Amino acid sequence: MTFVFPILAIVFLFGLSIFVHELGHFLAARALGMVADVFSIGMGPALWKRKAGGTVWKIGAIPFGGYVALPQMAPNSILEGDGGDAGSEARDLPAIAPWRKIVVALAGAAGNFVFAFLLAAVVWVAGKPSSLQELNAVIGYVAEDSSAAAAGLAPGDEVIALNQRPIATWLDLSEAAALAPNDEVTLRVRTVGGDERDIVLELVATDYGLRVLPGLAGQDPCHVAALMPGLGAEQAGIQPGDQILRYGDQEIHSRAHLSQLVEGAGTEPVEVTVRRGGRELVIPVAARYDEDSQRYLLGIQFNILSDLDFTTRSHPTPWAQVKSHAGSIFRVLRALATPSTSGAAAGAVGGPIFILMMLWLMIKSSFILGLWFTGLLNVNLAIINLLPVPILDGGHVVMNLYEWIARRPPPARVLNFLAHAFAVLFIALFLALTFRDSVRHLLPPLRHWFGG
């Protein structure tokens, strides 16, 4: 059941996202007196279909994608997925005014926006489990040999701007770094003491092609999951469920930060402050040198799933969620359209495998997080579909605006050529992103599992 529920949830949420998009087209078309030959959720051969109300209702064998066949959208009805489906019949139908077709084209995106708001309302009411990196941009760890350490950055410092762009969370910072126009960036930092200063750092590229700030990581809590028998933490009385707050007089900002402090203290006993059952306790603990790992250990195994706080959930309003989703997408699109940032933005874009992996991880952590991510996908789907590109809804809008203004439709041969050309480009892009996602996200764990 560990795998079954996330898989079913992914298929259901993806299918529902496609359904509301196509339902928007369908309802608008029927309200404006248009004929809908086929309403299909999924692509490929029909697993089930039935004709009712003049429309063939169909579930395709491939669970991703869907379409509504609207013959009166001609001469560009091929953009609606009408590729000779058995439910579509050649016949004379009354012409439809361009403004009506524009409304129908826009209605799909409207359906996704409505669905995104509904999902956001559920997240708002239920509360969204959040990590510290979603709540602030406080530095949790600084590698000792990094340029960040050489610049004087320390755990507890807060990044408030990157290249004069305001930063509110660590996720904002990661996005701003990935989309920065140059490798050199200027951070505005508020230190633990409250002073503000500017730090210049060089971004580095990860194995995945993303640019990141070297030697820096955000905050994460230190929740004890288990203890290693015979080591200092167990002997001193640390218990599973404790949260480590301070090591000596140092506030702990991340697990890596704690390991760094333990390494510096050696085997000397240090007072460790923990939170247990609402109380704070001070427990002296001595580390022990481990020959195998060649480092000092307290003997603590941390609960990495506790990065998400399920007790103090955030309640962002539906508008705030949708606005945040749209803002992220527009920043990526703007970066892709800007020559100085297009390469970095293209490297940061995830394909279908990455999206499925993210949704899988979200649902595994919390179904509410899965709903939140589905809201993001719906806003993404709505905005991308409105781009003025043939085979997308935005292409319908542009073509029908032309027909409305010129009082004649664009040449059918031109439309068909553009439709087929962009269909080939989109398929090529889909395959390229899938291949890159496979290399980035699937091959490394496979090599690890098989010892390659």
Image: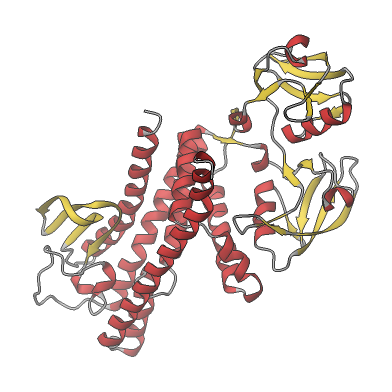
Residues 23 and 151: in front is 151
Q: How many marks?
A: 0
Q: Is residue 236 above or below residue 39?
A: above
x, y percent for residue 108: 34, 61
Q: Is residue 328 above or below residue 238?
A: below
Side of 208 where 72 appears, left or right: left
x, y percent for residue 165: 73, 60
x, y percent for residue 408: 28, 89
Residue at left 18%, top 78%?
95
Side of 103 where 383 appears, left or right: right
Residue at left 63%, top 57%?
210
Of the 4 image quadrants, the one containing the N terminus is top left
Q: Quadrant of residue 187?
A: bottom right
Q: Is residue 134 above or below residue 428?
A: above
Residues 35 and 214: in front is 214
Residue at left 41%, top 63%?
431
Residues 120 and 303: in front is 303
Residue 120 visible within the image = no
Residue 97 visible within the image = yes
